[in-house]
Image (cartoon, rainbow, N blue to C red):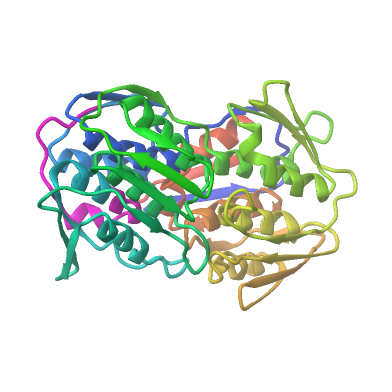
Amino acid sequence: MDKLFVHGGSTLKGSVHISGSKNASLPILAATLLTGETCIIRRVPDVSDTNYMIQILAALGAEVERSSGTVRITAGKISHDAPYEIVRKMRASICVMGPLLSRLHKAHVSLPGGCIIGDRPVDLHIKGLKALGAQIDMTGGNMIMEAPGGLVGTEVDLRGKHGPTVLGTDNIMMAAVLAEGTTIIESAACEPEVVDLANFLIKMGAKIKGAGTRRIEIEGVKKLNGVEHTVIPDRIEAGTFMVAAAMAGCKDDGVTIKRVCEDHLIPSTEKLREAGHEVTFNDKGDECVVKPGKEPKGVNIVTAPYPGFPTDMQAQFASLFAITNGISVVEDTIFPQRFMHCAEMTRMGADIKVDNGTAVIQGVTGMSGAPVMASDLRASAALVLSGLCSTGTTEINRLYHIDRGYENIDDKLIMIGANIERVREA
């Protein structure tokens, strides 16, 4: 099992390129099941989550080739049975349900199991697919889904307890593109990753209006075609490097972050500026420079569905606030249990009190490296950021969490001046 040793005290400068979005790649890869023709997807990040999705596609019978960020998929003859041994490794594997039901009118998919950051039920997925005409039986931890006469368009509301469901919106949208008639998704997720999937489906020949709003309209078509598509930049990876630059960047030059989308980064940009840091985008909005502020201050954050502040960035900002003068308050309304990184950061000297989905952070003048345990993907990134600004060495265990969603994060940080080493243990 790999470990990461982060030696504190380095100053970051230079430039870093952001990879394609992990959260956009997964449903787009699944959507290739909707056609028997070849699809070519570019800028797919080489992370364990995308590797698992590619394994699932191959297990379903698709021909898959991967090379240098480009994935070529031909799902000519495919099975409807997604194997548990791969599905259990990644929750996002449930987004094969929609394409399989849409194209084959049947799907057998295992329930993905629990999640460390809190309850993430699939009930809204099931609600939407049933509304489209699917018959769904739950047995032995599996979802047995059939639509003998095909799916039929309808209106479905995907409003959930903590806001819209992103993967649920993806699944229903993919199910509806080959359904008979028109489907309207109310309370749809507006995330850029949903829009990227819609754009991919439209290239394939789907008829979709309203992606990026709370109401999406899909008119079913008879057939979809193979296409080429380039995945959008990963806004969470970009935000993570923006925070790293604010915490440990060169005060004069900062860090240049390339291949980004300014519009997708508005919440993170606004909070960094509010905290006193400098963020400057170029005219195209695809590159920014982040410099640490001269007198940074604490701010408050409340997570919310897009275009609000992303839950996937609250852990990284907690790392920033831990060494920022004053008091900061971070409230996660999406996943109130998502604060396990705070206990690990407290071991490093942070002053954080967590109660009922809210962290109150009193900035300290310094933290010290310690052995810490990553609990989830974004928590592991937060611990890396804390390690960069601590005295001594931070040993991060359970590194497989960070490899789920960050492509070569240690190599990228080393390229801009970080002192990090990955130790591979048998």
- Residue 142, x across and y down, in percent: 18, 64
Number of numbered callouts drawn:
0
In the depicted structure, whether residue 175 falls above or below residue 137 = above
Residue, x 61% and y 31% (percent of image)?
261
Residue that lies at the very extreme toward the bottom in this rendered image: 355
Residue that lies at the very extreme toward the front in this rendered image: 181
Q: Quadrant of residue 236?
A: top right
Does residue 374 appear left or right of residue 178 in this picture? Answer: right
Does residue 241 appear left or right of residue 199 in this picture? Answer: right
Q: Is residue 83 magenta?
A: yes
Viewer-closest of 378 and 164: 164
- Residue 188, x across and y down, in percent: 47, 52
- Residue 27 visible in this rendered orientation of the protein: yes
Residue, x 75% and y 45% (percent of image)?
270
- Residue 394 visible in this rendered orientation of the protein: no
In the depicted structure, whether residue 12 falls above or below residue 308 = above
Residue that lies at the very extreme toward the right in this rendered image: 295
Q: Is residue 249 magenta?
A: no
Does residue 105 appear left or right of residue 70 in this picture? Answer: left
Q: Quadrant of residue 56?
A: top left
- Residue 266, x across and y down, in percent: 69, 42
In the depicted structure, whether residue 328 falls above or below residue 274 = below
In the image, which residues are magenta? 73-95
Viewer-closest of 379 and 129: 129
Viewer-closest of 14 and 91: 91
Residue, x 28% and y 59% (percent of image)?
131
- Residue 229, x across and y down, in percent: 39, 24
